[in-house]
Image (cartoon, rainbow, N blue to C red):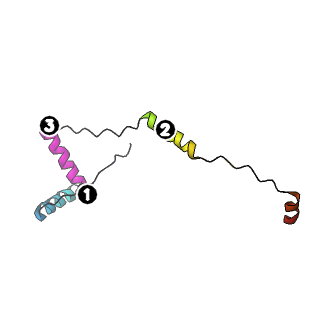
Amino acid sequence: MAAVKTSTLTIRIEPTLKEAIRSAAHQQHRSIANMVEVMIRDHCVRAGIPLVPDPPPAESPTHKASRRDRSRLTTQPAKPAKKHSPATIARRT
């Protein structure tokens, strides 16, 4: 199964509501985040709110091609090997 990308939701609630959600999550062996997600999903189903995932951002084929072509343009050709003179070779040995 493919992993679903998640996003962060930061909220402020009364301490009594936080304790209630913590207690509900503990009873169902869930994390607080998962319990909130389940409750939101249940509410949406009961209220008739469709849960349609956001479509992934599409990258146009021309964009991919242009990025690929751009990388080819920035690649430097390999430099030819230096040819050493006989004197240089003699000094190295």
Task: Name the residue carrying label 2.
Answer: 66
Tag in front: 3 or 2: 2
Read off the magenta span: 33-58
Query: Residue 32: x and y, percent?
Result: 22, 58
Q: Is residue 29 visible?
A: no
10 or 73, nearer to the observer: 73
32 or 8, nearer to the observer: 8
Task: Name the residue carrying label 1.
Answer: 31
Q: Amino acid at mark 2?
A: Ser
Q: Earlier in the sequence, mark 3 or mark 2?
A: 3
Q: Earlier in the sequence, mark 1 or mark 2?
A: 1
Magenta stretch contains residue 51:
yes
- 49 vs 56, left or right, is left
Q: Is residue 84 visible?
A: yes
Q: Quadrant of the N terminus?
A: top left
Tag in front: 1 or 2: 2
Task: Name the residue carrying label 3.
Answer: 48
Question: Compared with residue 71, is residue 23 higher up or lower down, i.e. above or below?
Answer: below
Magenta stretch contains residue 80:
no
Query: Residue 82: x and y, percent?
Result: 77, 54
